[in-house]
Image: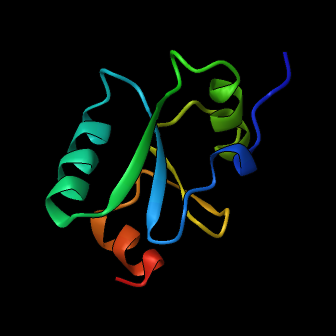
């Protein structure tokens, strides 16, 4: 099986993709804030989506750190604040 690529998960303009796990408190907090702010996001559970744990490791220096966010321009951020997300999306 090949490792997933960031381009496989690049969101539409104004949205983000968030790699997460069911048990991640930081992920839950960010999801709650995104919903409250009306920012569209796609959640990808790295424990249930083949190839994504390796992808998250690749962008985080070998660590499976979540939440890892993918922005429309293909860049990533690890555990960003809501303000970081809003700034990156130009909101």
Judging depth in this view, the residue of 85 and 81 nearest the camera is: 85
Image quarter in which the N terminus is found: top right
Left or right, 19 with respect to 84, comes to right
Can you say whether 72 is above or below 91 in the image? above
In this view, which residue lies farthest toward the bottom? 90
Residue 26 place in picture, x, y as percent: 29, 40
The picture quadrant where one finds residue 52 is: top right
Can you say whether 79 is above or below 15 in the image? above
Can you say whether 80 is above or below 21 in the image? below
The picture quadrant where one finds residue 74 is: bottom right
Q: Residue at x 70, y 42 (%)?
A: 61
Judging depth in this view, the residue of 27 and 10 nearest the camera is: 10
Q: State the colouring used for the structure image.
A: rainbow
Residue 22 place in picture, x, y as percent: 33, 21
Can you say whether 12 is above or below 87 in the image? above
Image quarter in which the C terminus is found: bottom left
Q: Residue at x 39, y 52 (%)?
A: 41
Judging depth in this view, the residue of 61 and 89 nearest the camera is: 89
The picture quadrant where one finds residue 64 is: top right
In this view, which residue lies farthest toward the front? 12
């Amino acid at each position: 099986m090949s490792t997933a690529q960031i381009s496989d998960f690049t969101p539409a303009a104004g949205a983000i993709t968030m790699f997460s796990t069911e048990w991640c408190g930081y992920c839950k907090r960010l999801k709650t804030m995104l919903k409250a702010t009306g920012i569209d996001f796609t959640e990808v559970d790295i424990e249930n989506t083949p190839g994504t744990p390796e992808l998250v490791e690749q962008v985080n220096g070998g660590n499976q750190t979540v939440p890892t966010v993918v922005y429309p321009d293909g860049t990533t951020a690890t555990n960003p604040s809501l303000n970081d997300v809003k700034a990156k999306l130009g909101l």
